[in-house]
Amino acid sequence: MRTVTFIEAINEAMKEEMERDEKVYVIGEDIGIYGGVFKATRGLQSLFGPMRVIDSPLSENLIVGSSVGAAAMGLRPVPEIQFSDFITPGMDQIIQQAAKLRYRSGGSFSVPLVIRVCCGGEVGGGLYHSQINEAWFVHCPGLVVIAPAFPYDAKGLLKAAIRDENPCIYFEHKKLYRSIKQEIPDTDFTVPLGKAEIKRKGKDVTIVAYMLMVHKSLEAAEKLAKEGIECEVIDMRTLLPIDKETILESVKKTGRAIIVQEAPKTGGVAGEISSIITEEAFEYLDAPIKRVTAPDTPPIPFSPPLEHFWMPNADKIIKAVKETMAY
Amino acid sequence: MPVNTKVASKAKEKLSAPFSAEEGKKLYYYLLKTRTVDEANRKFFRQGKLLGTYFSAVGQEATTVVPTFLSRPTDAIGPSHREIGCSITRGIPLKFMLAHLMAKRTGMDKGKCHPCHYGGFEYRIITPASTMAAQTVVVTGCALAFKIRGEDNIGLGFFGEGATAQAGWHEAMNFAGVQKLPIVYICQNNLWAESVPARLQAAITDYSDRAKAYGFPGITIDGNDVVQVYVTAKEAIARARRGEGPTMIECKTYRWYGHSEIDPADYRPKDELEGWKKKDPLPRFEKYLMEQGMLTPADKTKMVADIEKELEEAFEFADKSPLPAPEEALEDVYAPGTFEDWVKGWLK
């Protein structure tokens, strides 16, 4: 066992998979010579050369689209989108090509690629370096949408995604890159796609979250435990396909549910989870489901007081839990 | 090949043929087959046998059949929706193509996609999406895969002149130039992007001029001259296979009918079509082959009979094939053995 940061876990996963399988390559902006703006691909080009660690032009459509073509020919590309804010020029290739090529070819083509996307706020990134837009992709069947919160899961999920036959989008919250450390095994391991995990057991209320919000939820749960409220915290880990069973089993036990999402409220993952609980566990609920989310404004305003006001945090979660408990 | 060379349209009848008699005959067979099947499909559509719509490529056959004829089965093809010639020449059985047009379970896409979106991994033809230039980006990725692996396969990217206005197209061309990818881009300039004339699509006359900006050769040819397409595509393919990078070939051509069968194409001047029909690639090539002594009327009669027979059997196969069962809509979303139960969970 050894302790690694979130970004070290990601770097190790790519390195190990590239060593294991020569079909794996990475492509993106500033990822080769520079090692990535956050250093996720540090050292890879010197190990694997410029044709497996490709510095691309400023071309997100090409980064994704060429990966679709290479994947269709049997390679396993791991394209990087430097900031989720910059994914829009690549949307056509993600939505129309990556997600649909298998379906539209009657299952003839496989598109085994993993699009790594750096996202999220609380780092003062401003309106164009903080966006949190996972919901766009959750509405796109054919994709697997991955959103880890811990280094162990980050590494295991990335390795599983690279080995998977489906097109995956893998979100990396930049606030977690260096703020979270964890012990991980030295041996090869993967984490199954499509499976949530309970990160803290509790009997009073279920909190469902992902990425940075898992940590905010655990912080809230810690404080609430001192007041005698035991929260069960579920880390979604994969957002599409969604792991209904883990959520429903927990809610059936606690009878109360809070869903925490960093993104704006309307049309997001939290609404989807809320609908699942309402449809499939309504009679178990002792209180209405609550969502703790950002407001419905473009994500995420720049100035510190604006960003602080905007971001969901432990205090907002604690308030929601108390309201739910008091219902 | 010098950058941005313009080759004037010029009859080559006097020169010796750049191919053997056997090759010339085979090439004619694929052109004739493409034309025959395409016209038959239009008829089937009007008879109500096909679903949705139908995109005819009549008039443009040389631009798709010839480069595909010159390719290897392991070369990747990124077609658009008017590339029936690629599919026929690469060898997708007619019965599967007809079944696809009838939205039957036995079509290559099992009734999922959209008419004339032929493809399949076994043919190395990327089943197209309808967002035009997106295919150019994807086939550029196929060429990248070949380069990463060190294989001498190439990509063939087909698009209309209209698609060259899209951002993704530029990104693909730029990257192919930077990486010297093994790919040949074939622009079918048929003068109309659905209903929008060339003068409203770009401020240039020859789209091959665009290649100059990406640092590789662009060449404009008469896309209805089979011999010229053959010579140009052969050199471009060889160049790509040698690792010398991409070439863009602009083929000036014309689609005889509307964008699809539901489009009367009444936006075009009446005499324009008549002018282009005189440049029909098929009789031109037929005359050439006969003058070269490579094709006889008897050869042609046999080819027509063979094609008609195959078409008849293909139609019968497709017509008798079942439509998909409704729940088959839930299949092929994810890879076999992954998340199938999750997709089917919707039924509950």
Image (cartoon, coloured by chain):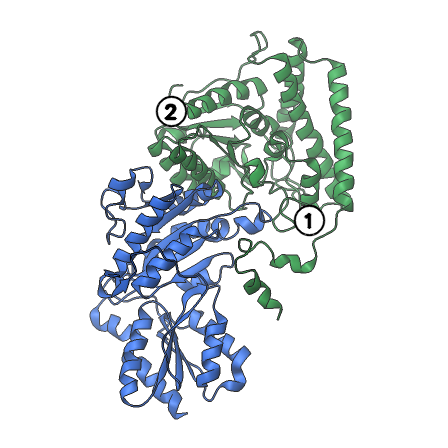
Chain colours: A blue, B green
How many numbered circles are shown? 2
Q: Is residue A248 above or below residue A148?
A: below
| Observer able to see residue A131 | no
Residue A21 on image: x %, y %: 39, 44
Residue B284 on image: x %, y %: 64, 18
Hey, which residue is sitting farthest bottom in the picture?
A326
Figure quadrant of the N terminus of chain A: bottom left
Going by the image, does A287 lie left or right of A173?
right
Going by the image, does B305 lie left or right of A259?
right
Closer to the camera, A281 or B130?
A281
Identify the amino acid type marked 2.
Answer: Glu
**Residue at figure coordinates x 41%, y 92% from the top left:** A327
Q: Is residue A217 above or below residue B197?
A: below
Q: What whole-number distance in Å separates the C-alpha atoms at marks 1 and 2? A: 42 Å
Q: Mark 1 highlights which residue? A: B103
Q: Residues within 10 Å of mark 2 (few under 14, many from 20)?
A: some
Image quarter of residue B289: top right
Residue B131 on image: x %, y %: 51, 46
Closer to the camera, B274 or A300?
A300
Task: Provide the chain ID for the residue under circle 1.
Answer: B
Q: Mark 2 highlights which residue? A: B244
**Residue at figure coordinates x 51%, y 75% from the top left:** A276
Q: Is circle 1 on the same chain as circle 2?
A: yes
Mark 1 or mark 2: whose residue is earlier in sequence? 1
Closer to the camera, B262 or A304?
A304
Task: Provide the chain ID for the residue under circle 2.
Answer: B
Element class at badge 1: loop
Element class at badge 2: loop
